[in-house]
Amino acid sequence: MDAGQAVRVGGQAVLEGVMMRAGDRACVAVRRPDGTIETRPVPIPGWASETARIPLVRGLAALAEAMTVGVGALRWSEERALPPRSDGRKPAPVWVLLLIALSAVVAMVVVIPSALAGLAPHGWFAPVETVSRVVVVGSYVRLAARRREVRRVFEYHGAEHLVVAAHEAGHELTPEVVRQGSIRHPRCGTSFILVIAAVAAAVHPLLPVDPWGDRLLSRLVVVPLVAMVAYEVLTGLGALAARRPGGLVERMLLWPQRFTTRWPDDDQLEVAVVALRGALEPSTVPAPDATNAPTTVVIGASTPS
């Protein structure tokens, strides 16, 4: 394994593409409607590295950084992969998308399960709240997967995992070799949802149940604490899974990904490889100029998939 492969890499699926990150560098690659692959370096705020040695705080910083970078990459992929809007309206700012995303997560993980649990008989509140949380999140993912755009994102999610695994194993990044891996990866953010649900199930029974206002407020207040603890737990589980490949911990972390990953085609794998190379070798992706214009990379004669 060469020095470049010693850098831990990760990524995120976007619309018709993948964002890859290697240390403090990241690159997003998107398949354009004309079949070309367009890439763009992604700036990293650096919040996570500044708090890397502070337990709990580092988790919140890492999550905030990941959401900011991820939503920015997703917005850019929307601009490049989809045709212009016919009504000419400009897309919402990134901070608005972040607020919407956070509100949706809080609603599914906190508000809706708490409301449903309030309808349960006395003594059943905690188990109903826990089960409702899993059912609400799972149902949302199932319904969303019916949309073609979401299924495509899940396929790019699988491509990201395959390419990251092949890179970490020191394998050649060709479709034939990459496909020998798994579309599930222990460090996937999807597993974080499972850990959050488990931490919330342990914390919420300690909070008020009635009246409704106190119940909701108490759960909203501890959301950052639940996220920070879940991050630390996930980090520990990830380290344990790495020491025991194929063990119970790894299987547990991989299980949620059955809902958010699909097998990609070769064109999608190609995009993921381009994104990874852009993150590992930033010289191959010129920085945007003053107009923030990206660079277009044409790979072979691939056609839109």
Image (tube, rainbow, N blue to C red):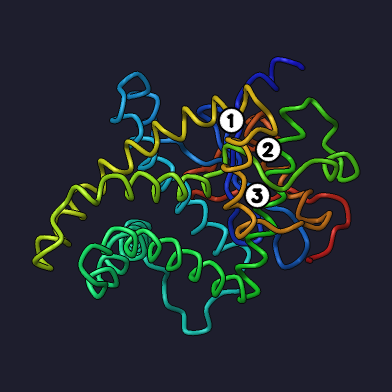
Quadrant where the N terminus sits is top right
Q: Which residue is mark 1?
A: 22
State whether residue 171 is above or below residue 270.
Answer: above
| Residue at the spot of label 2 | 276
- Mark sitting earlier along the chain (3/1): 1
Q: At 76% across and 57% down in the image, what residue appears?
A: 263
What x and y, as percent, mark residue 104? Answer: 35, 65
User: Badge 3: few (under 14), some or many (20 or more) residues near its Cα, within 10 Å?
Assistant: many
**Furthest-right residue in this view:** 176
Q: CA–CA distance between discs 2 and 3? A: 9 Å
Residue 173 is tagged as: none
Q: Who is closer to the viewer here, 115 or 169?
A: 115
Circle 3: residue type: Ala
Q: Is residue 233 above or below residue 54?
A: below
**Residue at image mark 3:** 29
Q: Nearer the viewer, residue 9 or 190?
A: 190
Please, what is the three-letter code of the amino acid marked with disc 2?
A: Leu
**How far is disc 1 from disc 2 in space, using C-alphas?**
8 Å
